[in-house]
Amino acid sequence: MKPLIHQKYIVPVFLIALSLTAQAVVPAPDGGYPRQNTAEGAGALLSLTTGGFNTAVGYLSLQGNTTGSYNTANGAVALHENDTGHSNTANGYAAIRANTTGIGNTATGAGALTFNTTGDHNTASGTSALFLNDTGNNNTAFGWRAGSSQTTGSNNIYIGAEVAGVAGESNTIRMGRNITDTFIDGINGATASGGAAVFVVGEAGKLGTMPSSARFKDEIKPMDKASEVILALRPVSFRYKKEVDPQRVAQFGLVAEDVEKINPDLVIRDAQGRPQTVRYEQVNAMLLNEFLKEYRKNEQQECKIEQQDAIIAHQQEQIEALTTGLQKVSAQLEASKPAPQTVLNSQ
């Protein structure tokens, strides 16, 4: 009986041991550090001194961090050189790798914000997004290599793959590359009064309004006869080709090739130098000048007519006065004639 009893008590103990072993993680976690820091990977958080609440996962991630806090690095050499920068989030190989003191940066994608050193509050989403940004602040980039040429500029927004931007530019929005059509809902039919017309400048697609203040102008002089070229323009009615306008709505305007022959400065060209469209706003200014010239001519003619009318009226008054005077003289002469005498013939 004893062997059976012995077996009865040993079996449960053995089962409990198996159960505890099955629930354990192998190998056990080894990334916990003081001040609520977590590191996993060779060299991760290697230089940490007093920084707290950092998370580094990946080879050499946050390796140079000393006092920086609240940083998260996921990926090999992510935030590798960060020293005192805080509140940065890097997800991807070499994301925000060169950061030293920059704060509040967020990078998602391999090579995103790689060369950022002291720039603050930048957001990069996409492989190599904001790749070269160094000291620029408050930049936002979405897409592969979006904003990748940006270096020191601030307050820029880049949206779209390979919308690289220009080094050092600031306060700029760039959207799309090699895009042929743009659709934005909520504009058609929406009323907006008191604003300025928006123009597209050049093949790069820069948007803006046309300033009219003298602060932006040089060589200001009267238009004079320069506007007379519009008198040779040939307005036409037409319909756009179906691939341009599927509705083929009736249109009225000018043909750019015809306008180019009269005044090339009134034509906008495409990337190949071909006439693309007409600068209608310039034509309108010329029309105004011609209208004012005709208006002034009419004013001068009306002034001359008024002067002539005044002269004629004065002459009429003189004629009437002369007529009245002649009538008076005639009456006086008539009155001064001697009375006719009667001669009696007495026989």
Image (cartoon, rainbow, N blue to C red):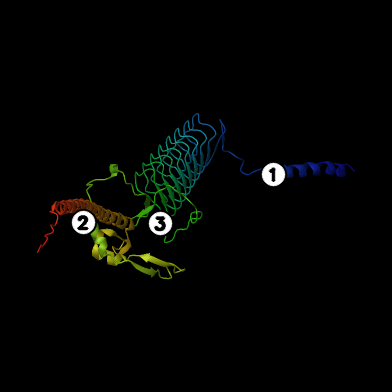
Visible in this render: residue 128?
no
Distance from Cα at disc 1 to Cα at disc 2: 93 Å
Which is nearer the eye, 315 or 64?
A: 315
Question: Which residue has dot 1 on it?
Answer: 23
Question: Which residue has dot 3 on it?
Answer: 177
Q: Secondary structure at mark 3?
A: loop
Distance from Cα at disc 3 to Cα at disc 2: 42 Å
- Which quadrant of the rendered structure holds the N terminus? top right
Question: Which residue has dot 2 on it?
Answer: 225
Question: Answer yes or no: do the residues labelled 3 and 2 have beta carbons within 8 Å?
Answer: no
**Mark whose residue sits in front, 3 or 2:** 2
Kind of residue at disc 1: Gln
Quarter-of-image position of residue 244: bottom left
Q: Horizontally, is 321 left or right of 130 in the view?
A: left
- Which quadrant of the rendered structure holds the C terminus? bottom left
Kind of residue at disc 3: Arg
Label 2: few (<14), some (14–19) or many (≥20) C-alpha neighbours in 10 Å: few
Q: Secondary structure at mark 2?
A: helix
Furthest toward the top, the residue is 50
Label 1: few (<14), some (14–19) or many (≥20) C-alpha neighbours in 10 Å: few
Visible in this render: residue 302?
yes
Furthest toward the bottom, the residue is 242
Furthest toward the left, the residue is 347
Distance from Cα at disc 3 to Cα at disc 1: 53 Å
What residue sits 28% from the left and 67% below the top? 258
Which is nearer the eye, 301 or 122?
A: 301
Nearer-N-terminus badge (1/2):
1
Q: Is residue 146 above or below residue 267?
A: above
Q: Horizontally, is 222 left or right of 78 in the view?
A: left
Kind of residue at disc 2: Lys
